[in-house]
Image (cartoon, helix red, strand yellow):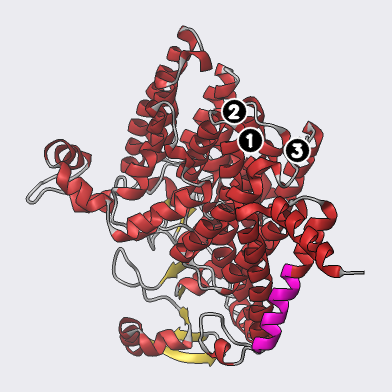
């Protein structure tokens, strides 16, 4: 039997199934398979893929064999199945696996993730075209999306609670912003007042810094289990609960079951959502779930629940007014078909009025009990020689010198921040059929971009939770108005981007905390013993790493004191390297203290007898 005609016939059939793009897809899938083999072999030899030493040790015969073997196998499966479905799934799986491998093993770099996303976008365009994956008719029932949301909530809460507590127990947590809030909740539990000594190094109410009555809603949970860890679990659960609001929003917008599930994944995979939970505790992190819940009732045209959740948003902090005002502006500018009649206008005006009244009242409270709202973060807009600098300076600059505003807002660091925010939603917030919706980006400008305070435009801190919720809402609004094919493509791109951005960012931190606990368990136990042995009623000062562990004490202060002269207390705790490398601390110790105990992680000093 002559095999030549059979091979020719098989080649013609294969070319008919593949066409021009299919051959490229076949080669790409084989290349991904061989690259994964090469990188995995290098990882086994502890060689980093961004180090050229990996190339030196590559076995080129094996590399070529894996490439050719994968290509022949996929070509054979294409012939057997008489179509490209297997090839499409293989290409998607291998390219996604390669991207995840690179993302997990790479230093966190949004530009690196952007490059991975660009390549995967090309892959997704091919595999999703012509229903090559065969998933277009896939139906996901409502109960399945609810189950998935529940599992995402439980998994998110458990994972982020565990690693945020691990961060605390390994002495990586800080006084700002965990120790001061833990001490505040202890005072709340005992006295009903939000006292703290760790926020300004004197006994004062937290309401003299931020007006946050929302904390009283959390107090019953803390009172039930009065431990710092309770706050971290509450925070993770509240952030994770946002997935239920996203599910409701997607269903109200008419997303399919699969689209609703994808929307839930978009939320938990956005880097600002898990990453911020790994940094201490803060009231701002409760904004995401409250804003999403408010928008859910906005879509349902339920005025009273909308106003209730808007009011809860306002109680979080004085500057929460900007987020509620953005919702009010959205109501005034959105299309009538989304909420017809004068009811929409009344609700929008009510939200704007509530925001204005709350902001004025909250600022008065902060001035009454403290030094006023923290305007220093807008210092770059203060006019020279102004006696009472404040918001008026920002308004004057915005109206008269817009060039200065652009100079302050569009810097390299803030451009990178915008990539962190919009890449995980595939930049869909800017695909709006009606530009009035973009008013939801106003808080992003005011809270994150105007200030030169680094933490406000850095993903991983508390200042991104409100804006992330609004960015996600804009993304869902844009996706709702797209055709099904484009929506499917951009949703898949956004999910891949979330993976590529979040895995190296949060995954590396989780691995670090786990490694510290494993490698330094005995040193951590020794440090715990030093802190536990401190006399309970003596005044103690501590650097940020230890102040957070002394939250149950009423007379604990932080060194350095950023707001006044350092207090000479009976005891002082610091890390050995701090005592050696911090000149200010070294001088303070030599003048007032004697070292009485030293462990690898901590040094304990006692005030000199003659002080």
Is residue 103 placed above or below 126 in the rendered structure? Answer: below
Q: Earlier in the sequence, mark 1 or mark 3?
A: 3
x, y percentage for residue 215?
54, 44
Q: Earlier in the sequence, mark 3 or mark 2?
A: 3
Q: Secondary structure at mark 3?
A: helix
Residue drawn at (21%, 43%), measured in percent from left and top? Answer: 390
Label 3: how many residues lie within 10 Å, few (<14), some (14-19) or many (20+)?
many
Circle 1/circle 2 CB separation < 8 Å: yes
The answer to whether any part of residue 478 appears in the image is yes
What distance separates the C-alpha of mark 3 from that of mark 2? 16 Å
Q: Which residue is mark 1?
A: 245
Residue drawn at (56%, 87%), measured in percent from left and top? Answer: 55
Give the prevailing secondary structure in the magenta stretch: helix
- The front one of 400 and 142 is 142
Q: Which residue is mark 2?
A: 296
The residue sitting at the left extreme is 385
Please state if 324 lies on the left or on the right of 243 as rendered: left
Q: Which mark is residue 182?
A: none
Q: Quadrant of the C terminus?
A: bottom left
Q: Which residue is mark 3?
A: 145
Q: Quadrant of the rendered structure where residue 308 is?
A: top right
**Mark 3 or mark 2, which is nearer to you?**
3
């Amino acid at each position: 039997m002559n095999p030549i005609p059979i091979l020719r016939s098989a080649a013609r059939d294969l070319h008919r199934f593949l066409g021009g793009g299919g051959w490229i897809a076949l080669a790409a899938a084989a290349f991904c398979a061989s690259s994964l083999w090469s990188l995995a072999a290098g990882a086994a030899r502890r060689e980093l893929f961004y180090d050229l030493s990996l190339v030196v040790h590559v076995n080129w015969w094996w590399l070529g064999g894996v490439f050719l073997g994968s290509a022949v196998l996929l070509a054979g499966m294409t012939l057997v199945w008489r179509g490209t479905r297997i090839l499409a799934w293989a290409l998607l799986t291998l390219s996604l696996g390669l991207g995840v491998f690179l993302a997990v093993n790479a230093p966190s770099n949004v530009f690196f993730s952007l490059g991975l996303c660009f390549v995967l976008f090309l892959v997704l365009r091919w595999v999703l075209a012509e229903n090559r994956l065969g998933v277009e008719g896939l139906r996901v029932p409502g109960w399945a999306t609810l189950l998935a949301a529940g599992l995402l909530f439980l998994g998110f809460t458990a994972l982020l609670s565990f690693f945020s507590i691990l961060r605390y127990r390994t002495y990586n947590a800080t006084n700002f912003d965990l120790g001061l809030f833990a001490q505040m909740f202890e005072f709340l539990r005992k006295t009903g007042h939000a006292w703290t000594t760790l926020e300004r190094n004197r006994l004062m109410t937290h309401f003299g810094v931020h007006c946050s009555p929302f904390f009283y809603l959390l107090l019953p949970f803390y009172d039930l289990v009065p431990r710092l860890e309770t706050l971290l679990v509450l925070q993770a659960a509240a952030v994770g609960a946002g997935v239920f609001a996203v599910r409701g929003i997607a269903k109200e917008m008419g997303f399919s079951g699969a689209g609703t599930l994808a929307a839930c994944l978009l939320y938990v995979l956005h880097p600002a959502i898990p990453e911020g939970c790994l940094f201490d505790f803060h009231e701002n992190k409760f904004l995401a779930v409250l804003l999403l819940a408010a928008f859910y009732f906005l879509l349902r045209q339920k005025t009273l629940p909308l106003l209730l959740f808007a009011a809860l948003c306002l109680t979080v902090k004085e500057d929460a007014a900007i987020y509620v005002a953005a919702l009010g502006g959205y109501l005034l500018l959105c299309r009538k078909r989304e909420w017809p009649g004068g009811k929409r206008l009344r609700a929008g005006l009510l939200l704007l009025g509530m925001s204005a009244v709350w902001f004025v009242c909250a600022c008065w409270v902060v001035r009454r009990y403290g030094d006023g709202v923290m305007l220093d973060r807008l210092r770059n807009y203060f006019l020279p020689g102004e006696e009472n600098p404040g918001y008026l300076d920002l308004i004057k600059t915005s109206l008269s010198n817009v060039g200065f505003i652009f100079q302050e807002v569009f810097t390299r660091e803030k451009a990178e921040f915008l990539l962190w925010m919009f890449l995980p939603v595939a930049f869909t917030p800017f695909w709006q059929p009606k530009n009035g919706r973009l008013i939801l980006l106003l808080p992003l400008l005011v809270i994150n971009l105007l200030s030169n305070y680094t933490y406000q435009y850095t993903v991983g801190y508390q200042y991104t939770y409100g804006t992330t919720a609004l960015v996600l809402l804009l993304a869902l609004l844009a996706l709702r108005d797209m055709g099904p094919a484009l929506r499917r493509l951009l949703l898949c791109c956004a999910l891949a981007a979330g993976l590529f951005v979040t895995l190296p960012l949060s995954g590396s931190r989780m691995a670090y905390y786990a490694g510290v606990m494993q490698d330094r368990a005995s040193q951590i136990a020794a440090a715990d013993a030093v802190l536990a042995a401190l006399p309970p009623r003596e005044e103690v000062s501590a650097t940020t790493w230890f102040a957070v562990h002394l939250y149950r004490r009423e007379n604990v202060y932080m060194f350095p004191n950023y707001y006044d002269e350092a207090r000479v207390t009976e005891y002082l705790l610091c890390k050995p390297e701090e005592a050696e490398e911090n000149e200010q601390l070294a001088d303070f110790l030599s003048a007032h203290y004697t070292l009485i105990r030293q462990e690898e992680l901590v040094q304990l000093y006692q005030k000199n007898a003659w002080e």
